[in-house]
Structure formats: structure tokens, C-alpha cells
């Protein structure tokens, strides 16, 4: 699933250095590397369904470069997983009588 397209702005005068490439930063966790993919054009995709019970939030370190090493920049994206399939617990009446005492 496409999450977002990351966009940076480079105001270089030379068109050669205005073409930006996006990648995961070296600090990206193995979990991020297996559950997400980042295309060079900035599209951030999931590679499999995410489950809030497994992980509520992901830290995605993104690096952008214009091809010159000293012009690389890094930022952090936080992906928060919503719990869309959460079902509240139900009591099974067949198991017996439930008793609650309150003061």
C-alpha cells in the first residue's frame, strides 16, 4: 500500500543537482526494512499488512541526496498504525453466571 510520497526541495541553480534520490538511512531497523520499501522517487510503501497488536508505531529514517555527498539530508517519518480490526471482548453466557461486587 502506498503510504505517502516524500518530497524535498533543492534550489540549486544547476538542473543536474536538482534531481533528488530518496533512500532509507543507515539507522533504519531491520523491521522497517522488511515491512516498508522506499522508491528512489520518494514513494513510501508497505510490503505487508501492518498490525497494531504487533507494533503501534514505526520510526522511518529517510535520507535524500542530490548526488553530492555533502548535500545529503536525513529526516524521520513516524508511521502510526491504526487498529481497524479491533473487536471488544464479549462474555460467553454459556460459561456461567458472572458476579461483580462494588463497594
Image (cartoon, helix red, strand yellow):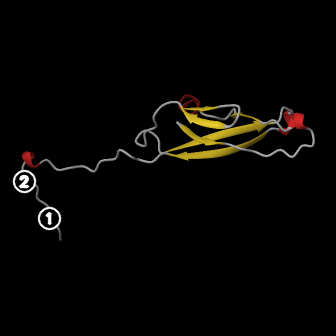
Circle 2 SS class: loop
Residue 97 percent coordinates (x, y)? 7, 53
Q: Which mark is residue 101?
A: 1
Q: In front of the other: label 2 or label 1? A: 2
Local crowd size for mark 2, using a 10 Å CA cut-off: few (<14), some (14–19), many (≥20): few
* Cβ atoms under marks 2 and 1 closer than 8 Å: no
Most foreground residue, 37 or 15: 15
Q: Is residue 73 left or right of residue 30?
A: right
Which residue of the protein is positioned furthest toward the front in this rendering? 15
Which corner quadrant holds the C terminus? bottom left
Q: Which mark is residue 97?
A: 2
Q: Is residue 31 left or right of residue 69?
A: left
> Which residue is at 40% across, 42% downward?
53
* Residue 48 position (above or below residue 13): above
Q: Is residue 23 left or right of residue 19?
A: left
Most foreground residue, 41 or 66: 41
Circle 1 SS class: loop
The tally of labels here is: 2
CA gap between label 2 and label 1 equals 13 Å
Residue 33 percent coordinates (x, y)? 59, 30
Q: Is residue 34 left or right of residue 43?
A: left
Residue 38 percent coordinates (x, y)? 64, 33
Q: Quadrant of residue 61?
A: top right
Local crowd size for mark 1, using a 10 Å CA cut-off: few (<14), some (14–19), many (≥20): few
> Which residue is at 60% across, 33% downward?
29
Which residue of the protein is positioned furthest toward the right in this rendering? 13
Amino acid at each position: 500500500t502506498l503510504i505517502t510520497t516524500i518530497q524535498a526541495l533543492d534550489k540549486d541553480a544547476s538542473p543536474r543537482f536538482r534531481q533528488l534520490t530518496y533512500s532509507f538511512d543507515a539507522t533504519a531497523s531491520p523491521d522497517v526494512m522488511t515491512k516498508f520499501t522506499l522508491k528512489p522517487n520518494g514513494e513510501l510503501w508497505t510490503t505487508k499488512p501492518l498490525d497494531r497488536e504487533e507494533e503501534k508505531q514505526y520510526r522511518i529514517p529517510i535520507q535524500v541526496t542530490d548526488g553530492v555527498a555533502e548535500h545529503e539530508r536525513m529526516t524521520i517519518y513516524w508511521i502510526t498504525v491504526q487498529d481497524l480490526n479491533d473487536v471488544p471482548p464479549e462474555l460467553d453466557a454459556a460459561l456461567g453466571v458472572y458476579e461483580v461486587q462494588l463497594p
